[in-house]
Amino acid sequence: MNYPNNKKKEDLKINYSNRGMNLENDLNDTNNYYLQNHIAVIHKKPTPITIVSVDYKSRKDAVIKEAYFKTPSTTDYNGIYKGKYIDFEAKETKNKIGFPLINIHKHQLEHLKSIIEAGGIAFLIIRFTTYNETYLIEASKFLDYLQKYNKKTIPLKFFQEYGHILKEKYNPRLDYLTIIDKIFLKGNDNEK
Amino acid sequence: MNYPNNKKKEDLKINYSNRGMNLENDLNDTNNYYLQNHIAVIHKKPTPITIVSVDYKSRKDAVIKEAYFKTPSTTDYNGIYKGKYIDFEAKETKNKIGFPLINIHKHQLEHLKSIIEAGGIAFLIIRFTTYNETYLIEASKFLDYLQKYNKKTIPLKFFQEYGHILKEKYNPRLDYLTIIDKIFLKGNDNEK
């Protein structure tokens, strides 16, 4: 098989935002592994933008000349695993004492609440880059905490106590579905 | 059947925002109705783009100065209904005799196949704007047809015979979930 060596547009992509990039790569690799191995179909949603101006040289070579980032109305990741609807948000923070809520939009929290009400599996994956520690936390516990304490930063201790640590492996990089099996699907392995 | 190949120049500078805009608006209204009434949580995914250059006046006022449209790797719509994972693509065509496959990317068809294999509910919503007729067709039937006949255009007749017509109403505009009840969830109303 021959692969042409011409540069793709994606190659030009610069890292416009370092925030969350490593966790995002880990999750994309993991989701790709799940897809290739027919374990789950979970994708990251594209970044929502508002397009203002487009230059059409031809249909294929349209260049967006002016656009703005939009506040996301849902989480970044969703899909299907063992017949169940899966939905989560993933964030990195450099903060040493906790997770600053400013990193998550109100709409995203409301979305997670809607998913819980609709019977879906909803959670968050939070990485503390200073310690290189990644936690999976059920959205219900996260939202309960917010309602109870109304804080601007959720302390690291909360994640250590109620979250599930995600160890990095070779393949899949960040095997979060084994945690989902334990906390959401225990004893339901044959459920459709 | 032979159709003249003289493509109009206007075809090259199609307004990307108008293409499918009416169907898209109808579906956004409908999904909003479903969300507000706690019937389903289904959202359209943002348009996938590759960002090349961003002008940061401030974090909030970042302006994207150069970006390109990416080929989508999944369908545009997904979410949860009655605990089930829902996934579909929606397209409009002006074509009078059928639906030209060029409107759907190979990756999107593969994605629909993955969703069927994973036990999700997968379908397409196709509107023939000339007749203002909108059909819901199960992805499995759509894919079966493609495999069997390998055509570049799927005839309108196929949709008339195997699809389900979606009548426009006041609210919700395009009540496609009642069709999903009939063809995917019949007799399973209490299923989780």
Image: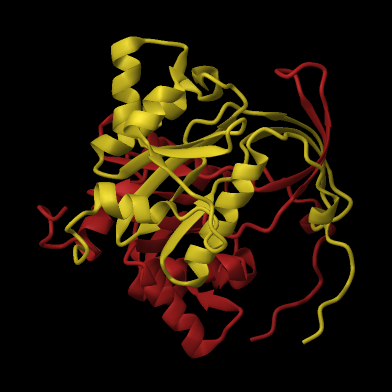
Chain colours: A yellow, B red
Q: Quadrant of residue A148?
A: top left
At x 54% / y 31%, what residue is drawn? A72
Q: Quadrant of residue A192?
A: bottom left
* Residue found at x 12% / y 54%: B189
Q: Quadrant of the N terminus of chain A?
A: bottom right
Which residue extends farthest front? A131
Note whether residue B22 is visible: yes
The correct choice, above or below, for B69 with respect to A151 in the image is below
Q: Write down the quadrant of residue B123 in the picture.
A: bottom left
Task: Give how far across and how far down residue A55 sits, in percent.
Answer: 86, 42
Q: Residue at x 36, y 67 (%)?
A: B118
- The number of discs equals 0
Against B76, residue B186 (above or below) is: below
Residue B44 x, y percent position in the rendering = 49, 44
Q: Which residue occupies the foreground of this view, B82 or A101?
A: A101
* Between A123 and B16, the one nearer to me in the picture: A123
Relative side of A54 to B35, left or right: right
| Residue located 46% across and 50% down the image | B77
Q: Nearer the viewer, residue B19 or A85?
A: A85
- Depicted A18 relative to depicted B22: above or below: above
Where residue A128 sits in the image (x, y, percent)? Answer: 55, 32
| Residue B176 appearing in the image | no
Q: Position of residue B32 (x, y in %)?
A: 38, 34
On the rendered structure, is A155 left or right of A189? right
**Position of residue B18 in the picture relative to residue B98 (left or right):** right
Position of residue B22 in the picture relative to residue B6 (left or right) = left
